[in-house]
Amino acid sequence: MEIIKKSKRMVSTSELLKSKGEKIGLVPTMGYLHKGHISLIKRARAECSKVFVSIFVNPIQFGPKDDFARYPRNFKRDCSFSEKAGADYIFFPSTDEMYEKDFKTFVEVQDLGNVMCGRARPGHFRGVCTVVLKLFNIIRPNIAYFGQKDYQQLVIIRKMTKDLNVPVEIAECPTVREEDGLAVSSRNKYLSSDERKNAVVLFQSLKLAEELIINGQKNLEIVRKAALEKLESNPFVSKIDYFDFRDKDMLYEIERIDQKAARILIASAIWIGETRLIDNILLENNF
Ligand code: AMP
């Protein structure tokens, strides 16, 4: 496995591989890899002839109160995990390499980026889209792999690539969970052991909402109320950013279940103590 730190070298490596007919898969990450990331790398390994993992904690997607400085990092371990999962290359640029001093261009997907996590974290998706488009231009993958865990990010990146004619296929990968159902996340590391035990309430509240809908509740305000009650009754939940029902493609709000609401995204973001966690469930209209 080769580690590449410079964009220029990355571009020439990628171009050479593509001229030989290689199919390039990219897994963009912020590092501190866990089994969620590993599942993406393994899927890329199965579908592509060359697998790239990018590791870059992107400063411009963090707000002033976010956890950029304390975001967990462990490059050595990331390298060994990536190699074991089947990566051929790691792209590991510095912040200066990605953002030169006079950097002035940003990518913004309107509307989709202003709801849910976008409302709670203004500018977050602008930062995400900007870095992802840069990574696409530098690594030039045929397929890029993203997790359903960050579902809004996936929808926004798909829209960006479509709107801007970016020649990359976006692959959607299922959320990997711990045994109790908590979605695996680099941020779980921040949780104390009591917080960790209680963090599963996020997944449980999503499952409760799913169950109520499957059992016939069509009024989603009633479903939301039940889910919020579950979250609010847990003493470790310090804040609820949102608990939403949305169209899975366009992210508009859904208030009632009807025939048109074919696939619903149930998504939530909460704080356990000082740690912000997100999760979601996709509900097929087969109930
Ligand atoms: P991050 O390093 O948090 O930016 O995540 C990099 C990629 O891994 C994103 O596409 C995430 O959606 C994906 N990812 C993170 N956690 C999980 C998980 N538990 N299951 C599946 N994919 C995940």
Image: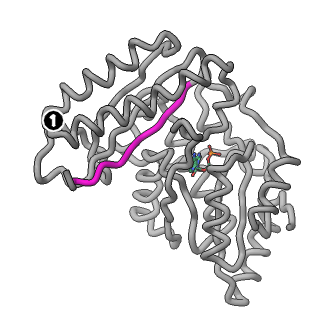
For numbered disc 1, what is the local secondary structure? loop
Residue plotted at (81% across, 62% down)? 83
Tell which of 72 and 219 is nearer to you.
219
Q: Position of residue 132 (x, y in %)?
A: 59, 54
Q: Is residue 42 left or right of residue 282?
A: right
Q: Looking at the image, which residue sits at the far top?
A: 235
Tell me if residue 145 comes above or below residue 76 in the rendering. below
Q: Position of residue 152 (x, y in %)?
A: 43, 45
Q: From the image, which quarter does the N terminus lie in?
A: bottom right
Q: Which residues are magenta?
A: 276-285
Residue plotted at (46% across, 37% down)? 279
Q: Position of residue 185 (x, y in %)?
A: 62, 39
Q: Is residue 235 left or right of residue 8?
A: left
Q: As shown in the figure, which amino acid type bears the numbered disc 1?
A: Gln
Residue plotted at (54% across, 36% down)? 180
Q: Looking at the image, which residue sits at the far bottom?
A: 20
- What colour-coding does the image apply? one colour
- The residue pinned by badge 1 equals 217
Tell me if residue 3 comes above or below residue 16 in the rendering. above
